[in-house]
Amino acid sequence: MLERYIKSKRKRFIIKRVIKSIPVILIATLVAFSLMRIGGRDPARVILGHTATEEMLHEFNVEHGLDKPYHRQYIDWMHGLIFHGELGTSLRWGRPVTELIRPRLPLTIQLMGLSLVISVVMGIGMGVLGALNPNTWIDYLTSTQALFWWSAPPFWVATIFLLIFAFELGLFPTGGYRNIYYLVLPAFVIGLRLQAVISRLTRSSMLSVLNKEYIKTAQTKGLKKHVVVIKHALRNALIPVVTIIAMYLPWMFGGAMITEQIFNIPGMGRFIYNAAMSLDFIAVQSSVLIITIIAVTANLFADIAYTFVDPRIELGQSEGV
């Protein structure tokens, strides 16, 4: 009976979170649509070049609906998206955006996924290590590495890693993509920065939890240290870590844009960069929509994960947040 009640509460909780996410996605599409048009530059002139005649510019604008008022362009784009599942046609490449994104998105997701694994494993490991050895050389070492990787600019880290591990030592490819091995080095470039955040947060959260009475009680009962740390302390300390991971997923996408440029990886990062440089409104706003959906979905999973990570959290309380 209790299990059925919890499942019912969790189901309502998920539905409520999904409904709350819809306005966020719509606002993101509107912001992306508006920002790309603030500058007032003519994408037809940028894409066709300065040698294009006025007639060619006019035909381009009519073909892509750019001659219509902004509100009409937005309504048409949303209509195609909602009722036909179409993201529109790229202004630069003249092909459906869905077709252009399809081979690139899985590649970027692989890169982000590998980066996330690196950041979570290293971050939690370093944080726990520091918390279990406070104010020792181990703690100082884990704190120093976190500060270093957080302060180091991603493009600098990527350049140094290329010079050392690719050109000098020859351990990794210098760029491009053939298999997942080509993503290991760029994944470390992205993941090391996020692990710095996770490491510091895990350390502070673990120190707070380790001082709780129920942890001391578990220790006095004679439970083994690894049982107390993993089953009791770490599980409760992971709640804010789950939050920060979900919040940083959009940042990881931004990091992927820079990293993919440096490592010449044909993923979403390069696609968005090239589309923005050529004022391909349709491609950019569609890409922002996808990024927003990923970020909202990640936060949704984070909210749901709270109920599994810490049994003390009640769904009824979570719904009121």
Image (cartoon, rainbow, N blue to C red):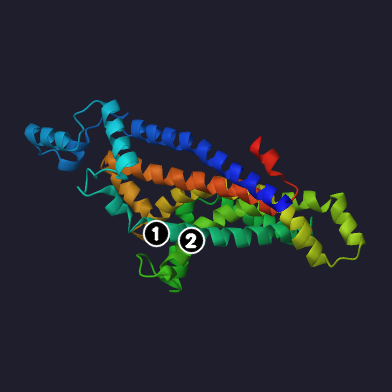
Q: Residue furthest front?
A: 1
Estimate the x, y position of residue 58 in percent, counting from the top left: 12, 32
Question: In the current view of this chain or complex, which residue is farthest to the bottom?
Answer: 170
Left or right of 192: which side holds 240? right
Quadrant assignment for the C terminus: top right
Of residue 28 and residue 270, the one placed in the foreground of this image is 28
| SS category of the residue bearing label 2 | helix
**In the image, residue 239 lies at what x, y percent?**
68, 49
Please give left or right for residue 17 compared with residue 269 in the image.
right
Q: Position of residue 298 (x, y in %)?
A: 53, 48
- Which amino acid does the dot numbered 1 rest on? Pro
According to the picture, the residue beneath numbered tag 1 turns out to be 106
Given residues 121 and 80, the one toward you in this image is 80
The residue pinned by badge 2 equals: 187
Secondary element at image label 1 = helix
Left or right? Give the position of 232 relative to 262: right
Query: What amino acid is found at the position of numbered circle 2 in the picture?
Result: Ala
Q: Is residue 156 above or below residue 283?
A: below
How many marks are shown on the rendered structure?
A: 2
Q: Most extreme residue toward the right, as rendered? A: 220
Q: Are marks 1 and 2 in contact (CB under 8 Å)?
A: no
Measuring 79% from the left and 56% from the top, which residue is drawn there?
134
**Residue 7 placement, left or right of 54:** right
